[in-house]
Amino acid sequence: MIERYSRPQMVAIWQAQTKFRIWFEIEAHAATKQAQLGLIPKEAAKIIWQKGKDIIFDVKRIDEIEREVKHDVIAFLTHLAEIIGEEARFVHQGMTSSDILDTTLSVQLKRATDILLADIDDLLSALKKRAFEHKYTITIGRSHAIHAEPTTFGLKLAQAYAEMRRNRERLLAAQREIAICAISGAVGTFANIGPEVEQYVAQKLGLNIEPISTQIIPRDRHAAYFATLAVIASSIERIAVEIRHLQRSELLEVEEYFSKGQKGSSAMPHKRNPVLSENLTGLARLIRSMAIPAMENVALWHERDISHSSVERMIAPDATITLDFALARLTNIIENLLIYPQNMKKNLDMLGGLHNSQRILLALTQAGLSREDSYRLVQRNAMKVWQYEGDRANKFAQFLKEDEEVSSALTNEQIDLMFDDNYHLKYVDLIFSRVFDE
């Protein structure tokens, strides 16, 4: 975890004190159920809760014990015994370390996901607001970074909204898959602890149960979870890259907000750089990189080995903390994005109406020409515009009208009708209704 790219609420989930509190609650809930089953004294379960409920765990003491015993759960249990006293002998009855570790990780990921879902909701709200604000702000669409046909900036934002809403659904599914409790003993057979205990602890922690564990929760669940975070990161980057491209000096259709006193370059005072969007590209790369080791964790030896442990100690906090930060940053960018419709219109017109080439093509075919001939005629005149070095305004229409083969099929009035840009916007309302369910 790097403080620069983290927010306190998410960081708190992964702090040692939070982890040990969850460990204690799992142990205490298990003891309560075992007492109900008559496996340990009811008074012992009561004392475990009373003495541990409000304790602030001594992290330094636990670390000190771990340096000696070389086992984190044993170190915690030893410290817990120092707090609880004689009744501590009834703690961890029939359980194995992974019962604690895996169930705790599930709790932490579930809580982290709640924050991420709220982050996505904030982003969706920002995207929707700006999309409706620029629903009819016409701009040129680009394929291969080359002018294609007109769209609107609102549609660009609506597409981002739809993508993020899909990501929200994916994240909900990933949360359901990862919110799993497994307290089934050394190799998952419940030999020394009954399934009733697992069911009780799961209910208390708001988790589902793993139908068949080994000594651990199967890691395909975790792989799917981190893969989902990687997909969300990729969507963040897609939006960030679009902003970066549109902010290029040659286009300047949008721009990240540049605050008073902000400086863009140590050498060039004029610079206003898309540094926030560039930062999101970097963070997305990091989050995606964590999906691969999560997938490699699936293939563990037999009922378990420990090769997954070091990986998850790093990627679980880092991926969720970084994604939380990235989502919040993107929301801020969208909310404060400077949008320049006049530049969009200027760029739209810079090629003299070439974006209407398909309309001319279709009109010629409908006038009786073959598609091959129609394409040839339109392309011939379009290439003249590409190569024209002067003011290109209305040049495409002019060249078409001067072309005898074109003018024999279409009147000047018919050609002029092909250059009404509102034609391209006639289904904007329909698309918005599909995206926003309105």
Image (cartoon, rainbow, N blue to C red):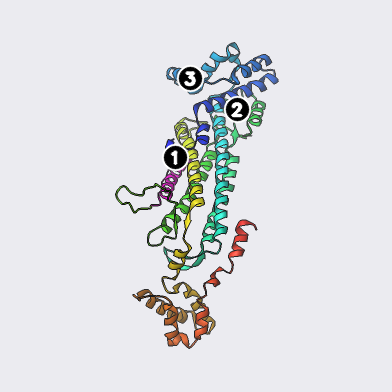
The answer to whether any part of residue 299 appears in the image is no
Q: Quadrant of residue 67?
A: top left
Q: Which mark is residue 5?
A: 1
Above or below, comparing residue 428 to residue 40 in the picture? below
* Three-letter residue code for mark 1: Tyr
For the residues labelled 1 and 2, the Cα–Cα distance comes to 38 Å
* Three-letter residue code for mark 3: Ile
Residue 276 highlighted magenta (yes or no): yes
For the residues labelled 3 and 2, the Cα–Cα distance comes to 25 Å
Nearer the observer: mark 1 or 3; the answer is 1
Q: Quadrant of residue 188?
A: top right
Above or below, comparing residue 200 to residue 252 in the picture? above
SS of the residue at dot 3? helix
Magenta segment's dominant SS is: helix
Q: Which residue is mark 3?
A: 62
* Three-letter residue code for mark 2: Ser
Relative placement, left or right, of 83 versus 69 is: right
Give the percent coordinates (x, y) of residue 114: 58, 39
Residue at image location 62% in from the left, 26% down from the top:
190
Q: Which residues lie in the magenta part?
A: 273-296
Quadrant placement of the N terminus: top left
Q: Quadrant of residue 206?
A: top right
Residue at image location 53% in from the left, 84% down from the top:
367
Q: Observer-nearest residue: 174 or 234?
A: 234
Q: Observer-nearest residue: 253 or 89?
A: 253
Residue at image location 41% in from the left, 72% down from the top:
351
Q: Which residue is mark 2?
A: 184
Q: Observer-nearest residue: 131 or 188?
A: 131
Q: Observer-nearest residue: 102 or 413?
A: 413
The answer to whether any part of residue 420 appears in the image is yes
For the residues labelled 1 and 3, the Cα–Cα distance comes to 28 Å
Which residue appears farthest toward the front when viewing the image? 260
